[in-house]
């Protein structure tokens, strides 16, 4: 993981450097709110959608084998519906040897037996849809498992239709070009050559060709090589298969890195072809990429892109202590008040401005790769402010299972299925109630996929359901506001009103036609008085959620007074 992540990071750093001039210029205190927007071409259902991400192995186990299953998700559909979410992103459930938790597929067309059957998948899609919930599934086009029959055939020294489906050098004693050297696994089989990996060593890269093939290395195929084209057709066939089964789209793993050495973004051609197929054959299908560069993702035809791994992202709510060059080690959403919202906003706004008419940015504040937002003692108030942020920003929001009840990042030292260190601690079983295994499974605790939170006060659904002030019920309310207010829809205008380096609060407006929403976020443990250049009649402000924020006029000036650790969502008309 480190190598490819490092490469992506170096690339992103370079791009950020190029963009930095445009970004530095921006002064968020000078703004105009127009209420104008144009709706990106995307299935109508996603414009107001709130997604819920489900990690199948740790959601709910119905047959007491210690691993969650598809029937478990079916059993919990009423709960999911009660959240107010309208869509689910389901992590991989395909047949796999599970060296990377299912992101190492050995059969794209089959459900892994530990999760159930094809019939279960069909039922899940249709029963969810009957409740108004669409399901998008994870699609991993960049690599397979080494156990996939295509790879086994490809590793055969005898030429066959799969020989070129993976990237092999033509001599075992040559690893690749110097700069790709480390990504080649040497001496794997009798085939005279080494294969290129995409992520872990057991995830050989499928061959989408090379943007700039080096003539000195004929094994670097061009993107339009017939074998590459055959692979591309097969990938489209897999997508059709799941859409026909009832899925409503895909979250696409590492979508930007399929073509190797690709300065001209030739990969776009493939995704635009996919988009064309969806537009004509499955116009209701939604595709969101894990590209992390929205400008490129939208130009490649994606409806949305998850935006992480960039400068300022870790300073938003991940709170990774200076783990990489992207972090100053302080989160904006911490009470210590040392965060810097502009680290995030400058990059976000740069992409938002360029893509707002084309597609949506999804801000992944939690997922199976990230540290849970409830870590190192965050309070329910802190978490509610983060949810308010997620659910009032433009784009399509995704909530990671368990974050709605404030599940904690656990300190799990075990490396399971590639979920080492921090990834493991964010993948523990959903906490349903106070019964053994916190209601996740009836199996013996020793058989659980991961241990459950052992703390006496581990948050759980049953208790929070009964408490009107619980994070669960507050999140439900925020989701409901998000889904009903036009000016909070994915496409409504986003205008930062107060966002300054190392300062709190963060204030922004969302606008659609004449409707306006003003959001004030002050996660810092210190009261603030902020002058903003927005003329509004405080009497016309209707508080939709939050408290501790007062808007007043001092002479002609509009003043926002924020209590420590407070937020508010106001609705007003001009
Ligand atoms: C990104 C996925 O989110 C992660 O969990 C996985 O390990 C890699 N891609 C490889 O597929
Ligand atoms: Ca099970």
Image (tube, grey):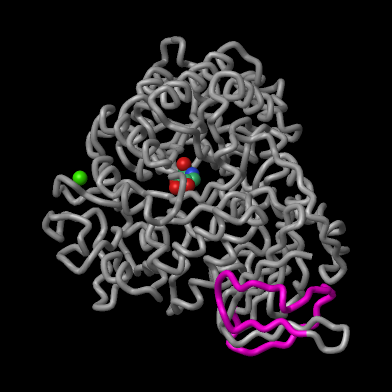
Residue 3 appears at what percent x and percent y? 55, 48
Residue at image coords 36%, 24%: 109
Viewer-closest of 511 and 53: 511
- Part of the protein shown in magenta: 523-552
User: Measured from the top left, where is residue 162 in percent x and y?
Assistant: 45, 15
User: Front-most of 444 and 462?
Assistant: 462
- Residue 527 among magenta residues: yes
Lateral position of residue 300 relative to residue 139, left or right: right
* Nearer the observer, 285 or 538: 538
Please determine whether, in this image, residue 257 is positioned above or below residue 458.
above
Image quarter where ligand 2 lies: top left
Q: Residue 568 in the image: x percent, y percent?
A: 61, 74
The furthest residue to the left: 444
Q: How many marks?
A: 0
Quick check: can you spot residue 225? yes
Q: Is residue 424 above or below residue 119?
A: below
Q: Is residue 486 left or right of residue 440?
A: right
Where does the C terminus fall, quadrant-wise? Answer: bottom right
Residue at position x 68%, y 45% in the image: 294
* Residue 328 within the segment the image draws in magenta: no
* Residue 524 drawn above or below residue 198: below
Residue shown at 28% from the left, 27% from the top? 118
Q: Is residue 199 above or below residue 421?
A: above
Left or right: 178 with respect to 116? right
Which corner quadrant of the image does residue 153 belong to?
A: top left
Residue 329 visible in rendering: no
Q: Position of residue 163 (x, y in %)?
A: 47, 16
Q: To which quarter of the image does residue 466 belong?
A: bottom left
On screen, residue 559 versus residue 467, left or right, reads right
């Amino acid at each position: 993981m480190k190598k490819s992540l490092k490469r992506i990071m170096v690339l992103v750093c370079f791009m950020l450097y190029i963009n930095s001039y445009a970004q530095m210029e921006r002064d968020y205190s000078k703004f105009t709110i127009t209420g104008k927007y144009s709706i990106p071409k995307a299935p109508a259902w996603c414009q107001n959608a709130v997604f819920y991400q489900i990690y199948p192995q740790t959601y709910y186990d119905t047959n007491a084998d210690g691993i969650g299953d598809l029937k478990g998700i079916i059993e919990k559909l009423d709960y999911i519906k009660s959240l107010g979410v309208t869509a689910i992103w389901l992590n991989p459930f395909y047949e796999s040897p599970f060296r990377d938790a299912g992101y190492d597929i050995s059969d794209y067309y089959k459900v892994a037996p530990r999760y159930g059957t094809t019939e279960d998948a069909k039922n899940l899609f249709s029963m969810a849809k009957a409740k108004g919930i669409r399901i998008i599934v994870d699609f991993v086009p960049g690599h397979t498992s080494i156990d996939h029959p295509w790879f086994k055939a490809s590793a055969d020294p005898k030429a066959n239709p799969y020989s070129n489906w993976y990237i092999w050098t033509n001599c075992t004693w040559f690893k690749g070009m110097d700069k790709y050297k480390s990504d080649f696994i040497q001496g794997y089989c009798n085939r005279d050559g080494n294969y290129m990996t995409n992520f872990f060593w057991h995830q050989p890269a499928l061959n989408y060709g090379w943007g700039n093939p080096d003539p000195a290395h004929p094994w670097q195929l061009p993107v339009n090589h017939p074998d590459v084209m055959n692979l591309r057709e097969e990938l489209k066939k897999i997508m059709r298969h799941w859409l026909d089964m009832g899925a409503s789209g895909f979250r696409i793993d590492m979508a930007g890195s399929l073509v190797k050495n690709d300065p001209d973004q030739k990969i776009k051609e493939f995704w635009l072809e996919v988009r064309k197929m969806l537009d004509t054959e499955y116009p209701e299908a939604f595709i969101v990429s894990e590209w992390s560069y929205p400008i490129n993702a939208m130009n490649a035809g994606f409806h949305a892109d998850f935006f992480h791994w960039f400068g300022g992202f870790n300073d938003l709510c991940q709170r990774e202590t200076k783990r990489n060059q992207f972090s100053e080690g302080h989160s904006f959403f911490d009470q210590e008040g040392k965060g810097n919202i502009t680290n995030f906003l400058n990059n976000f706004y740069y992409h938002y401005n360029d893509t707002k008419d084309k597609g949506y940015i999804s801000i992944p504040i939690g997922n199976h790769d990230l540290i849970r937002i409830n870590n190192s003692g965050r309070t329910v108030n802190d978490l509610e402010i983060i949810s308010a942020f997620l659910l009032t920003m433009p784009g399509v929001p995704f909530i990671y299972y368990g974050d709605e009840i404030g599940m904690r990042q656990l300190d799990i030292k075990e490396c399971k299925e590639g979920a080492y260190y921090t990834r493991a601690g964010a993948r523990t079983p959903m906490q349903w109630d106070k019964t053994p295994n916190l209601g996740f499974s009836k199996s013996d605790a020793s058989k659980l996929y991961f241990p459950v939170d052992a703390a006496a006060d581990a948050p759980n659904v049953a208790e929070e359901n009964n408490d009107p002030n619980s994070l669960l019920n507050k999140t439900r309310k925020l989701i409901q506001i998000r889904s009903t207010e036009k000016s909070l829809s994915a496409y409504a205008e986003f205008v930062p009103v107060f966002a300054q380096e190392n300062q709190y609060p963060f204030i922004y407006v969302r606008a659609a036609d004449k409707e306006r929403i003003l959001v004030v976020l002050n996660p810092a443990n210190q009261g603030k008085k902020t002058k903003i250049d927005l003329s509004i009649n405080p009497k016309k402000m209707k508080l939709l959620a939050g408290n501790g924020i007062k808007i007043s006029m001092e002479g002609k000036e509009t003043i926002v007074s924020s209590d420590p650790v407070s937020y508010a969502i106001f609705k007003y008309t001009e």
